[in-house]
Amino acid sequence: MQQIVGGAAGAKESDVYHCPDCDKRYWNRISLTRHRRYECGVAPQFMCTLCSRSKFWISDQHDNYLELSGRGPPFSCYQCGRLYSHKCNLKRHLRLECGVDPKFKCNFCKKLFKHRHHLNDHYKTQHDADIVS
């Protein structure tokens, strides 16, 4: 049984568009036209430079996949130049670290930290003290 691409509920077999070259079937003429123009009997026209996958077209969805997987282009901080593979990490860096004065101070040696967990690690390793809440 041949699979029909992109079906609609209640559609009849007579509503299907057949590709004369490979017998793939589509529910709408636009999909068949795209298939015949870009896919049928044609090697993939695009190569993703980041993941090396051959594709018939490069879509925004593929770009989103690359960003979420960390294989996309690095995101650079415009203030300090640090690179991040995920946009959310760059946003966190800009919000909490870059150009922000340290908020947490060691009570023993007065060293400053931008993150509470770094201060807690400092207490444990440098002063053999308990974690500060």
Image: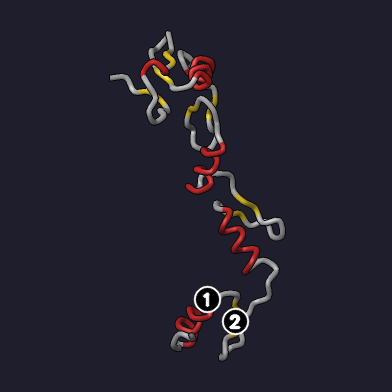
Q: In this rendered view, identify the residue nearer to me: 56 or 102.
A: 56
Quadrant housing residue 23: top left
Dot 2 and dot 1 residues touching (CB under 8 Å): yes
Pick the front one: 13 or 122: 13
Above or below: residue 124 compared with residue 3? below
Horizontal side, residue 59 vs residue 10: left or right: right
* Residue 96 in picture, x, y percent from top left: 62, 69
Query: Which badge, 2 or 1, is on the more N-terminal residue?
Result: 2
Q: Residue furthest front?
A: 10
Q: Position of residue 63 (x, y in %)?
A: 55, 40
Give the Cα distance between marks 2 and 1: 9 Å
Tell me the tag on residue 18: none
> In the rendered structure, which amino acid carries the disc numbered 2?
Phe
Asked whether 56 or 80 is in front, the reply is 56
Q: Residue at x 28, y 19 (%)?
A: 1
Q: Position of residue 22 (x, y in %)?
A: 39, 12
Q: Which residue is mark 2?
A: 104
Residue located farthest toward the left when viewing the structure as drawn: 1
SS state under label 1: helix
Instruction: Report the residue marked by disc 1.
Output: 118
In which quadrant of the rendered view does residue 15 lie?
Answer: top left
Check the image and name the residue furthest to the top. 20
* 25 shown above or below 95: above
Residue at the (60%, 82%) spot, across then down: 104
Please name the residue shown 57% across and 86% down the image.
106
Colour logic: secondary structure
Q: Position of residue 57 (x, y in %)?
A: 54, 27
Instruction: Say if 129 sits above or below 38 in the image.
Output: below
Q: Amino acid at mark 1?
A: His
Total labels drawn: 2
